[in-house]
Image (cartoon, rainbow, N blue to C red):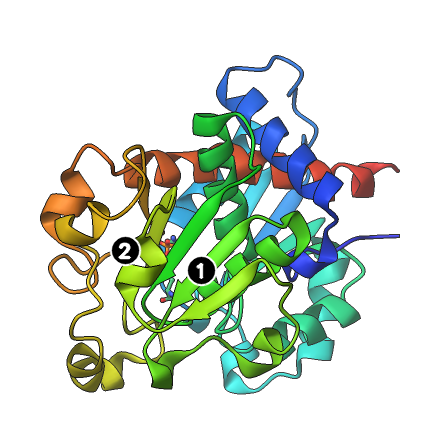
């Protein structure tokens, strides 16, 4: 039966470790990766903008021998109201897999339910699982494991934050989140956190002794009209050198990008010696290759 990657909750600890280790192996130039997607066609339906996720998935598909078919919002009938269950069944009859970036997680789930091919979440308003998998690969690559990790999430309780909570629930590393009162992570997700996930009220509390300081934009895609208000509300929540000074001396500063320099993070922090932000971005390529191998290869048995 086909498997989808809609949220990290679809994975076990063993699955996550296997995917990130495979990503690391691919980065080192593993020859085991032949062309498992040879002659296969993967649809990439993106309702929101993307630089990294789109290009890294597309290149990953080509590296595995497959064809990527990219569909922007104006290229499909979805945004003219064609029901998801119709789109899903039709696309399933042409394609071998679907990578979908959209607004609502429910719409993604509906696509997956009606598709007979694997569906991968390339970001929704609720989650960004592939991002956090490549982030975990980046940390694991540096440290060799994810044990005793202390991650500080600072800023908006958004889709990336929600996926970090899922990862911490499964892997049991310490995740301390500092988000302004009105911008906490999704309440249903917060209602089910394990004891290693904590909310604190200041960025300083979260950053103290952290191994990872992670932030993301204050206004995610779809929230642009709130940008001005959010800049006021997030005053004091910037990742900067004084926050980095509170963390472990080997702290890794992370951001999924795109960043708004001098808003949620300073230019100095992004370019400084503790930043691994551009390694993080690079690793999306290898990790996406590992995801495609896991989700698409089994579906290729004819
Ligand atoms: N981090 C990330 O998903 O970037 P894009 O929006 O450019 O894909
Ligand atoms: N939280 C951001 C992540 C972008 C990769 C957004 O959803 O816009």
Rendered image quadrant of residue 146: top right
| Image quarter in which the C terminus is found | top right
Any atom of ligand 1 within 8 Å of the CB at mark 2?
yes
Q: Is residue 58 above or below residue 112?
A: above
In the drawing, does residue 280 fall left or right of residue 3?
left
Of callouts 2 and 1, the N-terminal one: 1
Percent position of residue 112, x then y: 72, 66
Mark 1 is surrounded, within 10 Å at the Cα level, by few (under 14), some (14 to 19) or many (20 or more) other residues, namely many
Determine the CA span between mark 2 and mark 1.
23 Å
Q: Is residue 161 above or below residue 58?
A: below
Disc 2 secondary structure class: loop
Mark 2 is surrounded, within 10 Å at the Cα level, by few (under 14), some (14 to 19) or many (20 or more) other residues, namely few
Ligand 1 quarter of the rendering: bottom left
Write the residue at 46% across / 43% down: 135
Report which residue position mark 1 lands on.
176
Write the residue at 45% across / 40% down: 284
Residue 258, disc: 2
Q: Is residue 122 visible?
A: no
Disc 1 secondary structure class: strand
Judge by depth and name the residue closer to the eye, 17 or 58. 17
The mark tally for this picture is 2
In the drawing, does residue 254 fall left or right of residue 116?
left
Judge by depth and name the residue closer to the eye, 265 or 207. 207
Write the residue at 31% across / 32% down: 250
Residue 132, disc: none
């Amino acid at each position: 039966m086909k498997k989808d990657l809609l949220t990290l909750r679809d994975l076990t600890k063993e699955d996550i470790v296997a995917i990130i280790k495979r990503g690391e192996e691919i980065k080192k130039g593993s020859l085991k990766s032949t062309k498992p997607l040879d002659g296969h066609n993967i649809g990439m339906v993106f309702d929101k903008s993307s630089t990294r996720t789109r290009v890294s998935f597309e290149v990953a598909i080509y590296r595995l021998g497959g064809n990527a078919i990219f569909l922007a919002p104006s290229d499909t009938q979805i945004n003219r109201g064609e029901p998801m269950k119709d789109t899903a069944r039709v696309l399933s009859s042409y394609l071998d897999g679907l990578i979908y970036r959209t607004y609502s997680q429910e719409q993604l789930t509906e696509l997956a339910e009606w598709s007979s091919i694997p569906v991968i979440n390339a970001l929704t308003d609720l989650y960004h699982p592939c991002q956090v998998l490549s982030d975990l690969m980046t940390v694991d690559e540096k440290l060799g494991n994810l044990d005793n990790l202390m991650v500080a999430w600072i800023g908006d309780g958004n889709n990336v934050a929600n996926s970090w909570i899922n990862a911490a629930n499964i892997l049991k590393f310490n995740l301390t989140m500092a988000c302004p009162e009105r911008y906490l992570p999704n309440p249903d997700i917060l209602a089910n956190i394990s004891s290693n996930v904590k909310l604190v009220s200041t960025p300083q509390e979260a950053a103290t002794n952290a191994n990872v300081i992670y932030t993301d934009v204050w206004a995610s895609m779809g929230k642009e009209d709130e940008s001005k208000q959010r800049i006021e509300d997030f005053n004091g929540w910037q990742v900067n050198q004084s926050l980095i000074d509170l963390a472990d001396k080997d702290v890794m500063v992370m951001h999924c990008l795109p960043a708004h320099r001098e808003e949620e993070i300073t230019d100095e922090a992004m370019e400084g010696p503790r930043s691994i932000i551009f390694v993080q971005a690079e690793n999306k390529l290898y990790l996406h290759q590992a995801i495609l191998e896991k989700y698409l290869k089994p579906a290729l048995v004819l």
